[in-house]
Amino acid sequence: MASLAIQPFAGTFRAQPLPSSFAFAVRHSGVFWYRGSLSDVTATLRGSEDALALEGSARVDSISVGEPAAMRASVLGPDFFDAERHPEIAFHSAAIRLDDDGRAEVDGELTMRGVTRPVIATGCYAPPRPSSFGEIAGVQLHTSFDRRDFGFDWQMELPGGGNAVGWDVEVDIDLLLIREEAAPR
């Protein structure tokens, strides 16, 4: 990926809770994607002439996985997120590459359940521009990882063979960013 000669993000941009989103999906019973999202997400993008950094976090107890309520309790429990002991997911970028055509690639570290692992997210960005809210920008990223890398080891074999829950997790992050000087307080 060719990097921009001049990166377009100058200053600090904060993600707005609505409509920003953090969604995940994992194969269930080998036949469909089980989806969930986290609603209490924060993210900050800081840019200068020679550096760009993205940091974010999400409260695990803000997870939404639909009905029944027992499913949410299971996902928050020790077999999966273990929210009582590990209430937050965190991400810190190590390198961000932006291309002239709007593509983005972010190398960073993801921390879940007290385990930190490197990840690479790819996607796109919309550079800052004026709006009625101030200067806004957008970033959409996708990554995937093996949940066992973060200690999500629970599994049950299905009667006909195969796993109840897939090992690979797909993550999609969409951020509406507002330059800090204009962000609502």
Image: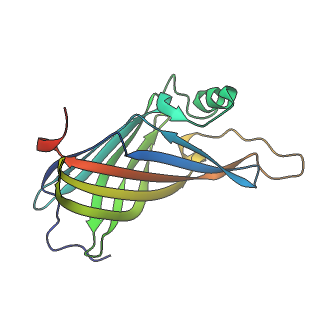
Left of 14 or right of it: where is 147? right
Side (left or right) of 121 relative to 55: right
Residue 57 drawn above or below residue 26: above
Q: Nearer the viewer, residue 33 or 106?
A: 33
Q: Nearer the viewer, residue 72 or 96?
A: 72
**Residue in the picture at 33% in, 42% down:** 56
Residue furthest out toward the front: 132
Seen at 73% across and 41% down, the residue is 155
Please name whichever residue, 91 or 129, is drawn nearer the observer in this view of the structure.
129
- Judge from the rendering whether residue 7 lies leftward or rightward of residue 109; answer left or right: left
Q: Name the residue rendered at 61%, 33% in the picture.
A: 75
Q: How is the image coloured?
A: rainbow
Q: Is residue 38 above or below residue 170?
A: above
Query: In the displayed image of the protein, which residue is found farthest to the right?
Result: 160
- x and y percentages locating residue 133 in the rendered image: 19, 46
Question: Which residue, as the protein is rendered here, is positioned at the far top?
Answer: 84
Quarter residue 183 falls in: top left
Q: Residue 158 at what x, y percent from top left?
A: 84, 46
Q: What x and y, as percent, mark residue 32?
A: 71, 53
**Quarter placement of the C terminus:** top left
Q: How many dots with numbers?
A: 0
Image spot of residue 94 (x, y percent): 29, 54
| Identity of the residue drawn at 14% across and 43% down | 182
* Quadrant location of the N terminus in the rendered image: bottom left
Q: Left or right: 94 with respect to 170? A: left
